[in-house]
Every structure is written in C-alpha cells, then in structure tokens.
Image (spheres, rainbow, N blue to C red):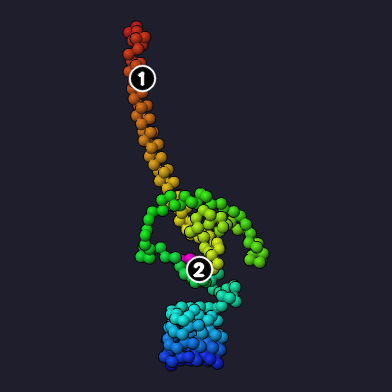
Amino acid sequence: MNTAVGVGALNSNTDGERNTAVGFDALLNLAMGINNIALGVGAGNSITGGSFNIYIGNLGVGPIEAVTIRIGDPTIHKSTYIAGISGATASGGMAVYVNPDGKLGTSPSSKRFKEDIQPMDKASEAVFALKPVTFRYKKELDPKSIPQFGLIAEEVEKVDPDLVVRDKEGKPYAVRYEQINAMLLNEFLKEHRTVQEQQKEIDTLMNELKEQKVLIQKVSAQVEMSNPARQVVISNQ
C-alpha cells in the first residue's frame, strides 16, 4: 500500500510498496522501491528505484538511491538552522563534518576502518611552515565581525595540499584542523621523547660528577696526608 497526495505523486509506481509522497510530482518517476518518503514539490522525482529514502524539498540523486536522507535544495537553500543543538550537551560524542556535496558524517578512529597505517614520522614537520593569522570574516558572512584565529587555506595548500578541503570547483575552501592537531601531537611526542633522552643524559652526567667529586675528595685527603710540611707539624706536636 502506498500513500500519494498531489498531482503526479507516485505517478510511475508499478511495483513499490509503503511509499509516501506528498506534493506535486513527488516521487513522480519511482517505479519500484519500498519505504520511501517524499515531501514537497518534485521531492524525490529524480529517482526511478530505491528504498528507505527520505526527501524533504529535495529532488534526490537518481536514478537509483537507497537509505539516504536529503533535505533542502542546494541550489536554493544557503543557510541551515536547527533547534535543540546550540546549548545542548552531547558528551562522549564525535564531531560532525560536511563534505563539499553537503554530506554529513563522522570521522571514525577505529583500526577497523583504516588501512595502510604508517607512523607519521617527519610528515608532521609540515606544521612548522604554517603561518597562523588573526582575521575577521567579511560582513556578509559574519555581521558581528568577531575576531578569529586560524590559517589561510591557500597558504596551507602550498605547504601540504592534503590539509585543505576543496569546494565543488576544486578551490581551497577550508583547513582540516583536526589533521593539524594530530600532526602537532606527533611533534609534541617527538619533542617529549627528545627531552626524556636529554634528561637521562643529564642524570648520567650528574651521577658521574658526583662520583668524580667523591674521588677528588679522597685524592685530596690522601695528598694532604702525604704532605711533608703537615707531617713535620704533626711530629712537632
């Protein structure tokens, strides 16, 4: 059973079930698929097949798509406001990232998701070539003109292209600060190990100096005892 509300909604459906289309031409071209939800004019009308999709004011990316949620039209909507996030605590969670296509996701750290794992070694030394700056975003981006601290994507690209995020045109757009944090950690650990090794050397030298001091004191005492002038004084007494 399907639910269609609006002219053209689910008009091409021949072998789909439990789909809900509300709006003019919503899921217009969907021929087969289950549990799709489309709300708005033309919502989801780009797909001809797929299941478990949710489209709200979005055409979808066809012809086949599955288990995807798309909200809004990227050619129209330029700002997003969602209540219940700002000021709400979600401890123990992960940061959410967005790629140039607007896809949201997290960046897992488990070994299960990684391959070709290698020590960072000298790769992190690129951070020494970065040039932190202070700046303000242009008025149309930040009317409050709040002072910012960070890096310039174009400058970072010159140091390491892998440290920037690019827009759909391939131009530098943002800096992957989380990667720089990992590089800084690697440099910190390298420096920490160096300091530890230096401290071991210092401790060794201090012990040697103490031993030498004791030895010098013994030799000095022996020299003093063998001094003829001292022996004469002692004999006269």
- Figure disc tally: 2
The image position of residue 85, as x and y in percent, is 53, 71
**Amino acid type of disc 1?**
Ser
| Image position of 121 with respect to 98: above or below | above
Residue matched to label 1 = 220
Residue 207 in view of the camera: yes
199 shown above or below 147: above
Query: Per the image, is 220 magenta?
Result: no
Alpha-carbon span between mark 2 and mark 1: 76 Å
Q: In terms of sequence position, does the residue under pointer 2 or pointer 1 come before the other?
A: 2
State the image quarter where residue 16 is shown: bottom left
Residue 226 picture location, percent across and down: 32, 13
Q: Nearer the viewer, residue 91 or 155?
A: 155
Tag on residue 99?
A: 2
Placement of 117 over or under 15, stated as above or below: above
Dominant secondary structure, magenta? loop
Quarter of the rendering occupied by the N terminus: bottom left
Image point (41%, 91%), residue name: 15
Rendered residue at 37%/62% (across/down): 115
Residue 146 lies, with reference to residue 69, above or below; the image says above
Q: Residue at x 37, y 58 (%)?
A: 117
- The crowding category of the residue bearing disc 1, from other C-alpha atoms within 10 Å (few below 14, some 14 to 19, many at least 20), is few
User: Of helix, strand and loop, which one carries label 2?
Assistant: loop
Q: Residue at x 53, y 54 (%)?
A: 158
Q: Which residues are magenta?
A: 92-96
Image x and y of residue 232, in percent:
34, 8
